[in-house]
Image: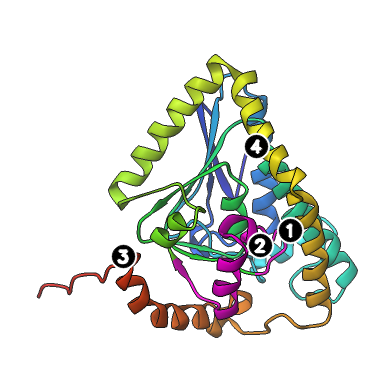
Amino acid sequence: MEFKNITYQPGKVARIIFDRPQYLNAQDYGLLAEVDQAFGLAVADKNCGAIVLSGAGRAFSAGHDLGTPEHDAYCEKHGMAGSKSLDLAQKVKDMLEFYVQKTLAWRNCEKPTIAMVHGYCIYAGWMLAAAMDVIFAEKETLFLPGMVEYFSAPWDLGPRKTKEILFEHRFITAAEAMEYGFVNRIYTTDQLEEETLAYAGRVADNYLSAPAWTGNIKNAINHMQDVQGFSSEIEAAYNTFCLMYGLGAHSGAGPDQGGFARTNIAKKNFEHAKPWLESIGLYKKSPPDKK
């Protein structure tokens, strides 16, 4: 199978790599459709025991694609609502399929999944990382959670911490994300890939030696969350997102302001948080450049 927006590497540890580095791996529907196909290939491969999701270039994913020519061409070809479409009903249908239903399906993929995150992980990037079982991050990664289609942040961070961060709207560091339980491990740039793939290899060996046992561990944990209301609340939160979207209550910020994610505000508020983060050991100033 030929892919245009991702790189798929089959094997004991299958790799799905977002490959739109010119857009910081912003997620258009074409990319997400290929991610879905790649997950299908990995699940069907009896020699695959784990799946690693990552991004090429400078970022894991800068979030939603808000209107690249490739995105609009894909929408036109497949009868979907592009970035300039005023067909709100079609937009709601498309977002439900690609950002909720597919993401829930990836969460419930029968094989262990690991997100390897670096650079920026913003909004839709957060959604895809959150859908994986385990997250390893480069220590300089900046995460931006938000009220998005797959609204997992209250589960990822806890309700009170989610309120604090989303009310202020700011980036959080990899150290914070680990402290709050969203990220499992953080590594330096030169360690991240090696350590992630080594861990994934051990997981794959365990899965391949006892797939039913390992698979049932995942099923039992996901079921525990679903009994608590995870999947039904994700679907209900999507309705809230659509109400916000339909009423025009979401941000109309332009690209120079960071678009839908308003990254300019998130960066400014992150600067305000740095002294506090430094005081509790969750942020460390970079040493000045030597001249």
Q: Residues within 10 Å of mark 4 (few under 14, many from 20)?
A: few
**Label 1 to label 3: alpha-carbon separation:** 45 Å
Question: Where is 37 relative to 98, above or below?
Answer: above
Q: Nearer the viewer, residue 238 or 54?
A: 238
Mark 4 or mark 2, earlier in chain: 2
Q: Residues within 10 Å of mark 3 (few under 14, many from 20)?
A: few
Disc 1 and disc 2 in contact, CB within 8 angstroms: yes
Kindly tell me whether residue 99 is visible in this rendering. yes
Question: In which quadrant will I find the C terminus?
Answer: bottom left
Label 3 sits on a secondary structure element that is: loop
Residue at the extreme top of the image, as rendered = 209
Q: Residues within 10 Å of mark 1 (few under 14, many from 20)?
A: some
Question: Where is 220 relative to 86, above or below?
Answer: above
The number of callouts visible is 4
Can residue 286 be found in the magenta stretch? no
From which residue to which does the magenta span run? 147-172
Mark 4 or mark 1, earlier in chain: 1
Residue under label 1, please give it: 74
Mark 2 or mark 3, earlier in chain: 2
Residue under label 3, please give it: 281
**Label 2 to label 3: alpha-carbon separation:** 42 Å
Q: Depth-wise, is mark 2 or mark 3 nearer the camera?
A: 3
Residue at left offset 77%, top offset 56%: 233
Residue under label 2, please give it: 70
Image-based side of 104 in relation to 253, left or right: right
Question: In which quadrant will I find the N terminus?
Answer: top right
